[in-house]
């Protein structure tokens, strides 16, 4: 039998690309030169993924400043002092704050998709940011003349368009990055915030047909940045029932870095609904050790015991560099882990 295997999204940018980004910011090279460097990085990423045997590829998010903020590039109605996200090692990331309405995306994910399709010889998957994450842009004290409900209406419309244009342009699937799901339980143990996130995301998902939702997935992880996380200490059992209430057809679940994967798999089996395919994480991007294909095989076989092989897929726990400036994992290590995932998944499929 065949078990599908997919990347989550980002691959670390090369030192040459990061230098070009810095040179452009400093005015040493122009936009055309930077665009050429981005094209080279996308082509190299896809070529290497295909050479490893990846049946589905992404562009490695080579052009994205971050997985979360790509729609905001160029907007002028933002201030830098938005929500702060603390990580376990003490570093933080900060979202911008919306200062006035209306809210519109400045960049849509289909731009990245079309760039990847120029070089791909296999299906291309497109990652997008979940609307729940962007809902954090709205300030707690409101915006004069633009209330929160008006903002959420605009956000739902924009998120729908981001997904729909990617599907219409031929994306094999569209993946909503929902790392804020697990974080929300940490911020609000009552789970009111999680429930609001699920409801908001379902407002978007419910605008699609069943056939379209079968091509739409949701990725969850405890955040991975600079070899640290923001919510790994949150019990997965507190998130997963709410996660599978999302009306999506695919779920990409971080699992390799979990201390008790059997318990997590049992919880997934109890809450995943019929027709929902579960891709389990079998490589850990923030662990510098490269998994062996045999380790991956055993992780897949364990998951198959709990979920059954028919609705099982594999993935990496998270993107390898969701923020463009994250250099904690090398590009070569990322590709080595991808190879292990692909080869280990094939070994498990043979065994099954």
Image (tube, rainbow, N blue to C red):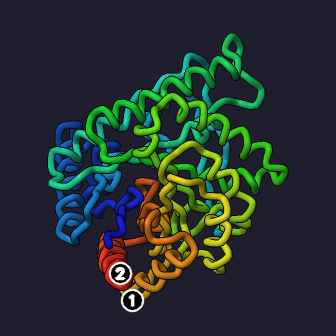
Task: List x then y, in percent, for residue 224.
Answer: 54, 63
Q: Is residue 76 visible?
A: no
- For label 2, the crowd category at 10 Å Cα-Cα, with few meaning under 14, some 14 to 19 and many 20 or more, is many
- Spot occupied by residue 177 in the image (x, y as percentages of width and height): 51, 49
Nearer to us in this view, 152 or 123: 123
Eyeballing the image, is 340 above or below 61? below
Is residue 70 visible in the rendered image? The answer is yes
Residue 282, label in figure: none
Q: How many callouts does the rendering have?
A: 2
Judge left or right: residue 185 versus residue 345.
right
Apparent side of residue 278 relative to residue 2 in the rendered image (left or right):
right
Label 2 or label 1, whichever comes before in sequence order: 1
Callout 2 secondary element: helix
The residue depicted at 65 percent of the width and 72 percent of the height is 266
Q: Nearer the viewer, residue 324 or 271?
A: 271
Relative to 79, 26 lies left or right: left
Residue in view at x 60 percent, y 45 percent: 246
Which quarter of the figure has residue 147?
A: top right
| Residue at the spot of label 1 | 294
Looking at the rendering, in which quadrant would you find the N terminus?
Answer: bottom left
- Against 269, is 291 above or below? below
* Horizontal side of residue 271 vs 126, given as left or right: right
The C terminus lies in quadrant: bottom left
Report which residue position mark 2 lands on.
Answer: 344
Which x, y percent locates residue 348? 38, 81
Give the vertical position of 179 relative to 265 (above or below). above
Helix, strand, or loop for circle 1?
Answer: helix
Give the camera-side residue of 253 and 14.
253
| Residues at circles 2 and 1 in contact by the CB criterion of under 8 Å | yes
* Circle 1 Cα neighbour tier, 10 Å, few/some/many (<14 / 14–19 / ≥20): some
* Position in image of residue 303 (x %, y %): 52, 75
Identify which residue is drawn at 21% across, 38% down.
30
């Amino acid at each position: 039998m065949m078990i599908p295997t997919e990347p989550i999204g980002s691959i670390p940018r090369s030192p040459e690309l990061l230098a070009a980004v810095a040179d452009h910011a400093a005015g040493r090279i122009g936009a055309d030169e930077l665009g050429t460097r981005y094209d080279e990085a996308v082509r190299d990423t896809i070529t290497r993924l295909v050479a490893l045997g990846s049946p589905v590829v992404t562009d490695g998010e080579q052009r994205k400043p971050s997985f979360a903020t790509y729609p905001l590039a160029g907007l002028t109605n933002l201030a830098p002092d938005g929500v702060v996200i603390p990580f376990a090692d003490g570093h933080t990331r900060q979202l911008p704050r919306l200062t006035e309405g209306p809210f519109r995306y400045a960049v849509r994910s289909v731009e990245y998709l079309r760039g990847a399709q120029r070089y791909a010889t296999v299906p291309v998957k497109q990652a997008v940011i979940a609307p729940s994450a962007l809902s954090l842009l709205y300030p707690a004290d409101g915006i004069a003349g633009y209330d929160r409900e008006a903002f959420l209406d605009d956000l739902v419309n924009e998120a729908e368009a981001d997904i729909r244009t990617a599907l219409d342009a031929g994306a094999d699937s569209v993946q909503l990055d929902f790392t804020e799901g697990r974080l929300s339980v940490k911020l609000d143990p009552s789970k009111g915030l999680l429930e609001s996130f699920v409801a908001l995301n379902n407002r978007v998902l419910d605008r699609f047909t069943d056939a379209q939702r079968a091509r739409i997935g949701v990725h969850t992880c405890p955040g991975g940045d600079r070899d640290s996380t923001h919510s790994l200490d949150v019990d997965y059992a507190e998130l997963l029932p709410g996660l599978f209430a999302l009306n999506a057809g695919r779920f990409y679940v971080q699992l390799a870095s979990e201390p008790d994967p059997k318990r997590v798999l049992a919880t997934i089996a109890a809450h995943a609904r019929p027709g929902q395919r579960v891709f389990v994480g079998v490589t850990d991007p923030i662990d510098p050790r490269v998994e062996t294909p045999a380790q991956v095989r055993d992780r897949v076989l364990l998951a198959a015991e709990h979920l059954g092989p028919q609705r099982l897929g594999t993935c990496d726990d998270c993107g390898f560099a969701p923020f463009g400036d994250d250099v904690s994992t090398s590009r070569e290590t990322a590709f080595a882990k991808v190879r292990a995932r692909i080869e280990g998944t094939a070994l498990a499929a043979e065994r099954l």
